[in-house]
Image (cartoon, helix red, strand yellow):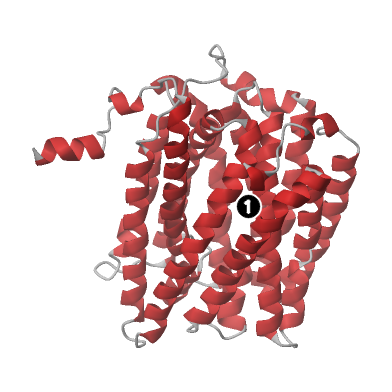
Amino acid sequence: MVVKKLKSIVPAFSKDDNIFRTRQIQENELPWIRTRHIWTGILGTVYGTFLGPAGIYFTFFCFASGMSKYQLGIMASLVSFAVVFQIFSWVFEDLWGNRKYPWYVFSILSRLCFIPIVFSFWIPLGPLSIIVLCSVSAVFGNLAAPPWSSWLYDLISEDQLAGFMSRRSAVIQFFIMGIALFAALAVQQSDQAHKMMIVRLVFAFGLTLGIIDLIFHVQIPEPHKKTQEAKSDFLKVIAQPWSDKKFRQWILIMLLWTVSMNICEPFFIPYLMKDLGFENRFVLLTVISVCLVQMSGFISFLFWGKIIEKIGTRKVFLICHCLWSVIPLFYLLSASVKPILLISIAWIITGIFVNGTTIVNPAITSILTKGKKRSTYLAVMTITSSMFGGLGTLIGSLIVKYFSIWHVFPVSLIARISSFVIMFIVMFNGRIYDKSDEAVIENPAEQ
């Protein structure tokens, strides 16, 4: 009885289980599907917050395990470069005949890679072991990502996707603040001798919720693909997005932005911990890098919908990236002038304008991939931008090694401003999409 009940909740690793078969989705199913997506988003975000390689807890764990800032940058580069494996996701989709099964298998394997880190008090891990585990986890995670995105886009129509993602983001932000503050308080109040043990317990909690996320998520039905294509050879498949002129322009501007951003982004938390002396101030770090971001993002949700309705996604996209580009300036000044105030302002700006891009980017991508093989398009876009993001992180790592961590900020600032100028030119000359495309995107706040 127990085994039968368990099997009904946690599907076996068999693609023949009914739960992995595609089917027609009824209109009356969409409300609970959307609600389930929101709850799985909360669980998955807790997992990512506590076990993300660039997060507060993982950075602290890495420093305590003997890792240098340069090695942290190398790890971030390898995690970014692992995105290249997304291009193989379509192979497993064709092999197994659906998107849910490869997503499920690779997502579980990705999370299981963190088990040795959770239990590292028995078998201590050095920097190399941590880098390998994170890289392998990233490989599996990237194999799982395109099937999930394609599956989501087929579940929720283009005219409702922006609104759903913004509502989902708002709910997630609200929950994450409370959970992150509780964990930060627990770590900060512990004495130095037990701090690493508490951090591992935080990892265990995040990993548990990450597994529960998959159990809940796999119950969401997968619809039939809206676009069915004959099997094709590998080179033809990956060449499709590049032959699409509008999508190619979209890839290129995101590529430039990602490389400029990643020169300094992985070094924000290490800089706060080691250079500004916040290493043991977990509550302050959480308030700055989690709560301020989440609160500003939540508040911005109230007005982004009206702004999108009034001026359109294209202008909102540009406004968000314009303000986002100046973030390194606050870190440049923080070394000498009121660091907590300047860093707080930087994270508030990040929360507001990253939330804006979270709303409009999926809508733009959805327009550009409508009626096409979305898994391949999404994989190629993510791979291209993230590979160059990894290159940006590698450049930042070399700057840290041969100069100092402070020097990554002016380099990134110059690169971001240059990227934004190119972005502005491309977005406003109508090469990606024109005003007629804007009509399909409704006000997200009203959906």
Q: Percent position (x, y) of residue 110?
A: 39, 47
Quarter where residue 327 is shown: bottom right
Q: Is residue 17 left or right of residue 399?
A: left
- Vertical placement of residue 373 versus 295, above or below: above
Nearer to us in this view, 84 or 1: 1
Residue drawn 81% across the image and 51% down it: 318
Residue position marked by numbered label 1 in the rendering: 390
**Helix, strand or loop status at disc 1:** helix
Quadrant for the C terminus in the image: top right
Q: Is residue 140 left or right of residue 339?
A: left
Farthest residue to the left: give it: 1
Nearer to us in this view, 221 or 151: 221
Any part of residue 264 in sight: no
Q: Percent position (x, y) of residue 124?
A: 31, 69
Q: Is residue 129 left or right of residue 244?
A: left
Residue drawn 61% across the image and 38% down it: 161
Any part of residue 289 in sight: yes
Quarter where residue 243 is shown: top right
Q: Residues within 10 Å of mark 1 (few under 14, many from 20)?
A: many
How many numbered tags mark residues here? 1
Q: Amino acid at mark 1?
A: Gly
Quarter where residue 399 is shown: bottom right
Q: Percent position (x, y) of residue 16?
A: 29, 22
